[in-house]
Amino acid sequence: MTVIVAIVGWDWVINGVLIFLAFLIIAPILGAVAFRWWLKTNVMEDSCPVCDYTFAGFNNKQCRCPSCGETLIANHGHFERVTPEGTIDVNAVDVSVKKIDDLPNN
């Protein structure tokens, strides 16, 4: 068989088939490694700053919290609220209050 292939000059066909079979074996492995790298760099998991619901999203993309519906953007591995230009975002603070009746008389 080898002599016939050598005489006819079809060794390039056999080499092509072997290269194709090697590609069929190696390509899915390389594809899986590349896909895992892409997932690690582009998908992040964090909690919503409004309701603390933990979910996954894509880096540098806007999304909505599935729990409260707040529009968020994923920046550097953390979710941030999307606020219109010129809006100042503040955090509310509980303040203890004393009634006038509770104050000592002078």
Image: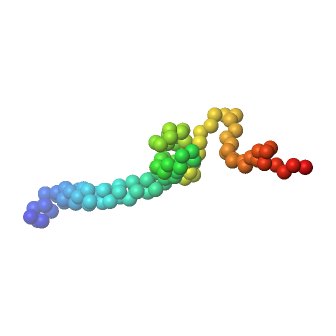
Residue drawn at (80%, 44%) of the image: 100
Q: Is residue 72 above or below residue 38?
A: above
Q: Nearer the viewer, residue 70 or 32?
A: 70
Residue drawn at (59%, 39%) of the image: 82
Q: Quadrant of the N terminus?
A: bottom left
Asked if one can make out residue 82 in the rendered structure from this viewpoint, the answer is yes
What percent of the width, then of the height, locates residue 88?
70, 38
Q: Is residue 57 above or below residue 71?
A: below
Answer left or right for 17 relative to 92. Answer: left
Please, which colouring scheme is shown? rainbow
Extreme-right residue of the structure: 106
Answer left or right for 92 relative to 27. Answer: right
Residue drawn at (87%, 49%) of the image: 105
Q: Nearer the viewer, residue 83 or 5?
A: 83
Q: Nearer the viewer, residue 99 or 32?
A: 99
Q: Nearer the viewer, residue 8 or 34?
A: 34
Residue drawn at (50%, 38%) of the image: 69
What percent of the width, then of the height, locates residue 73?
55, 43
What percent of the width, then of the height, locates residue 17?
21, 57
What percent of the width, then of the height, locates residue 7?
13, 61
Q: Which of the 4 image quadrants contains residue 50?
A: top right
Q: Which of the 4 image quadrants contains residue 99?
A: top right
Asked if one can make out residue 63 in the rendered structure from this viewpoint, the answer is no
